Amino acid sequence: MSSTTSTTVAEVKHPTLFNRLVPSVVSGIVLGIIGAVIAGVLINKITTALSPDSVPNDDAVTVAAYLGWLLFFFIGIGAFNGIIKWGFNRHEATPAEELELAGKDQGLWRYFRYTTDHKVVGMQYLFTVLVLFFLGSMGAFMIRLEQSRPGAIFFDPSTYNTIVGMHGMLMIATTIVMVSGPFGNFILPIMIGARDMAFPRLNALSYWLLFSAIPIFLSTLFLGGFPTGWTGYAPLSVQELTPGMDAYCFLILVFATSTTVAAMNIVTTVLVMRTKGMTWGRLPIFVWGVVLSVILSLTAFPSFIVSQIMVLMDRVFNTSFFLAASGGSGWLYEHLFWFMGHPEVYVIALPAMAAAAEVTAVFSRKPLFGYRVMVSGLIGICVLSVLVWGHHLYTSGSENALAAPYMLDTELISIPTGLFFLGMIGTLWRGKIWVTVPLLFVVGMLVNFVIGGITGIYLADLPTDEILHGGMFVTAHFHFTLVGSMVFGFFAGFYYWFPKMVGKRLNPMLGTLHFWLFEVGFVGTFGALFYAGLQGEPRWSANVAPPFATANTIASLFAVLIAASVFVGAYNVIYTLVRGEPADADEWGAKTLEWTVPTPVPLENFEGELPVVTSLPYNYGASLPEPVTSAAEITGAITQAPMQTQGQE
Amino acid sequence: MDTSLEHTEHIFELEPQVKVARARAGVLMLIVSDALSVLAIFAAGGYLSALNTLGQYKAPGDAGPPFVAELLIAIALLLSGFFYFWWERKARVSGGTGQPIFFLVALVLMFVAAVTETWFAAALRYATPIHAYASLLLLIAWFTAIHVILTTIIGLLVGGRILRGRIAGHEFIAEVTGYWWYYTVVAAILLWLFGSFLL
């Protein structure tokens, strides 16, 4: 458990304009571009000189340019300053230096620097996630436009494949960080009663690694894209001649490093920074979800990192990890990839489910139904999910004897998952339901997850998977699971915590419109694609064949509603930032610690002593207030209600 | 979008025991994550070796790493770990000073291992396309080289703190750096043994 001592800050430096710009993201980008050019030119000359035909190794040049970008970007943004001072300074960092690093007195500019304050990092993640979601959803809309009727409409097949690949990669990466990035950084430390994350500098590193991966991702557009799709399957990825594939591999390495750093930081924070009384049995369910998710990513991502190093070696050095003609195997890639690929679904799911559970308790005004069972459910999912990757290889010619264990294990996951969702429904049952935008998204999540979950059973069973694999049924299933369930969970958390993070209240009318457009559009789009899949439409086809035209036209029409929902959501955020009403410190009358601190949150979260926790944060009184109409009334009513803790029941 | 109060006059410092626990937990998690990468390499090597796809796993003439030279690197790494342990134990007892000569020897040995391993990795030459066996040897050589280089850099940073007298009061830095140091030695030796005898 953490405790802290206070030190008076003698002097806080006020930086000049130059000191504000250097180091910052501006100097990082400038130096990064210079580094990329220098490294690329250097390796171009070296590989040309070493080549018997005087031909440069394009893959080596691309990788060197990205390495140069990465190294010099981090020099430019000042990431190494702290490390060098840690090793070679005459004294430890003074409190004034620590405060400067945390962004004190730097206004909005602190969001563009290597700032260590966890709230700044959380906001950086939040806005990055929103921008990436916007770009990814526009990619999705382009896909639906192209598939709205048979034949090529806007894109040739290669461009279409690139758009599909970029959409997939962007959305998968964004959903991995969508909850644990913004809320795991901003909210989680306050929730456990900590003043910051365990490693503030690593916290900044995890975000800026993610940021530095974005130009690499966008550069694939100019390097021929990665027509393998987001899975990057070998040997196609090895044989694919465009340098865009190098960008894909490098992107994965940077992104996986970012998530690994973030995972280490979050786990350590929860292990050692909890305030007095915040025992494991009193952790808010959201904290459990995030911690288990990042433990899962720590376990799953190393094999993915190794797989991408191997692909890069195959491309740059002519090794043969995945080329059968030289003793390699495409199966090796599938195993290494899916050992990450399936747990990754739960890396995305666990924090979103936990955020939704948190929201459910608050707006039902009830303790979570079966808190311990729900936590056990999350742990059960975590354990089982690392053992199921083989179900992605059912039809790849794997040993038949492996099918039954993988089937069994895959279906076993439905038990802890079902228990968790049962807990959410039990929480809603006979609760004093306060219908808000966050709760709407939770209800949407429950509806969509039932569809996504039940259709998953058909894909977990080998006999039906033999028929459905590689088809639109799979596309519809995983969109119902990842988007209909987990992205809805993200939006539940987004509408719930936005007032605390930004200090302004999102417009509930626009929020409700956002929800209904999204839900109706989503169910319509992917419901139609379920039908197309059952008819036999394959996933990987740029042009829709005539037998599937009707289903695809319906899907594309409903996709217009999703696109409209994106614009409504974006307008709501921008409108709120510019003209939104200030939010209350405890906007929803919730009981977790983040709602006990002022808004805006002080630099070190808690003014004075850290709080002491004596019960679970769901101790809504037995004698609940009469139905109320405003947050202020609820806050007052809850404060006056007799405290009955769950632990005492 | 303001998330901080601008007039903070105090900064709250973590209690020493929290700093120690934080450092231990962070380094141990880094080791676990990295060890899983090593396991993935073992699994990939065993898999390709057992599959021997089209009988092309190993091309005629593909030789393993130079045994005696790699053995010498392994001995250097072991000695480096041993000297580090000696220094770290003394440093903990004597409040951070210890006997810096042992640390220096450990760092020099790690540096020598880093240079030699990098040189061996760069000198490995196989006819293209490089078959699976040789591919694995290259991966192991470079993976080891990068880890040993990283440990040398960490050693330089810790060496800087020793020179500045900043280990005293922060003995846990010596301890947790030791975790990574020993892990590097063990992982490098296991990878070498795997490449030499099990592929």
Image (cartoon, rainbow, N blue to C red):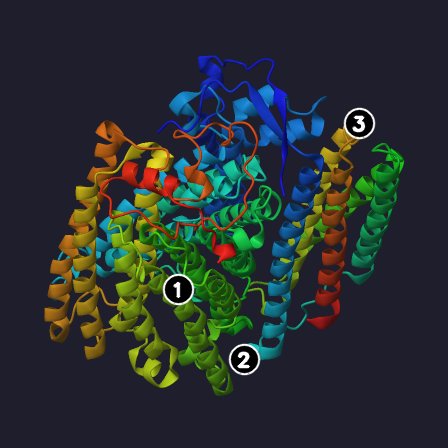
Mark 3 lies on residue: B163
Chain of the residue on which disc 2 is drawn: B
Q: Report x, y in % for residue A424.
A: 36, 61
Mark 2 / mark 3, whichever is N-terminal:
2
- Residue A38 lies, in percent from the top left, at 49, 34
Viewer-proximal residue among B95 and A535 = B95
Residues at discs 2 and 3 in contact (Cβ within 8 Å): no
Nearer-the-camera pick, A519 or B28: A519
Q: Position of residue A173 (x, y in %)?
A: 40, 52
Q: In the rendered structure, which amino acid carries the disc numbered 3? A: Leu
User: Where on the picture, by quarter, is residue A580?
Assistant: top left
Mark 3, chain letter? B
- Residue at which label 2 appears: B54
Which quadrant does the N terminus of chain A fall into?
top right
Q: CA distance from mark 2 to mark 3?
A: 57 Å
Please tell me whether mark 2 sits on a helix, a strand or a loop: helix
| Count of numbered labels shown in the rendering | 3
In the image, residue A564 above or below residue B65: above
Q: Three-letter amino acid code at disc 2?
A: Leu
Secondary structure beneath label 1? helix
